[in-house]
Amino acid sequence: MKARVYVTFKPSVLDPQGQTIRAALNGLGHKGIEEVRQGKFFEVTYDASEDLDAISRDVLSNPVIEDYRIEIL
Amino acid sequence: MKARVYVTFKPSVLDPQGQTIRAALNGLGHKGIEEVRQGKFFEVTYDASEDLDAISRDVLSNPVIEDYRIEIL
């Protein structure tokens, strides 16, 4: 089985990396970029015995500051 | 407008970070994880005057080793 796990900061958490990218793009002349938030994702190939939800919660994300979303491919 | 830009290594490029995550998961007892590849994404809010495709190609990704995919929200 194949799935993608998307991990983002919770909306209430500041994303300095995203802000830096936005500032860099504005500086390069792309003034129309209003906001950038950065996230990461994991493309996982696994067999059906694994509980991907538990893995995403316990290992791939930090539930204190991050949300995750699983997309089965 | 809002879009997500997904950036991944090209399939031919080694992904040591993904391999490390797979090895760590296997070590934690998740033996059913066969492969992990890591990527990043950018959630961009922008106005219609911007050419997001050009920005993704020139700034957000490295076209030598990375592919990108744009999803308009």
Image (cartoon, coloured by chain):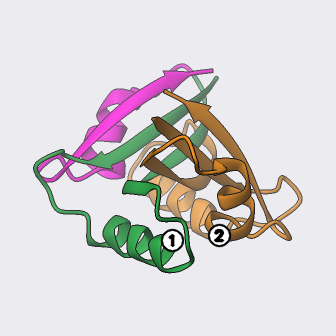
Chain colours: A green, B orange
Q: How far apart are marks 2 and 1 (CA)?
A: 8 Å
Give the residue pinned by disc 2. Answer: B59
Circle count: 2
The percent coordinates of residue A20 (x first, y second) are 37, 76
Same chain for labels 2 and 1? Say yes or no: no
Mark 2 and 1 residues: CB-CB less than 8 Å, in contact? yes
Residue B14 part of the magenta segment: no
Left/right placement of residue B72 relative to residue B57 reads left
At numbered mark 1, what does the secondary structure look like: helix, strand or loop? helix
* Magenta region, residue range: A48-73
Is residue B63 rendered to the left or right of residue A25? right
Disc number lying in front (2 or 1): 1
Q: Is residue A64 in the magenta section? A: yes
On what subunit does the disc labeled 2 rest? Answer: B
Residue at 58% x, 47% y: name it. B49
A45 to A27, vertically: above or below:
above
The chain to which mark 1 is attached is A
Q: Which of A26 and B64 is in front in this view?
A: A26
Q: Where is residue A57 in the image (x, y as percent from the top left)?
A: 26, 40
At mark 2, the secondary structure is helix
Q: Which residue is drawn at 39% across and 26% down?
A: A51
Location of mark 1 (residue):
A25
- Say which of B2 and B5 sits in front: B2
| Kind of residue at badge 2 | Val
The amino acid type, in three-letter code, at marker 1 is Leu
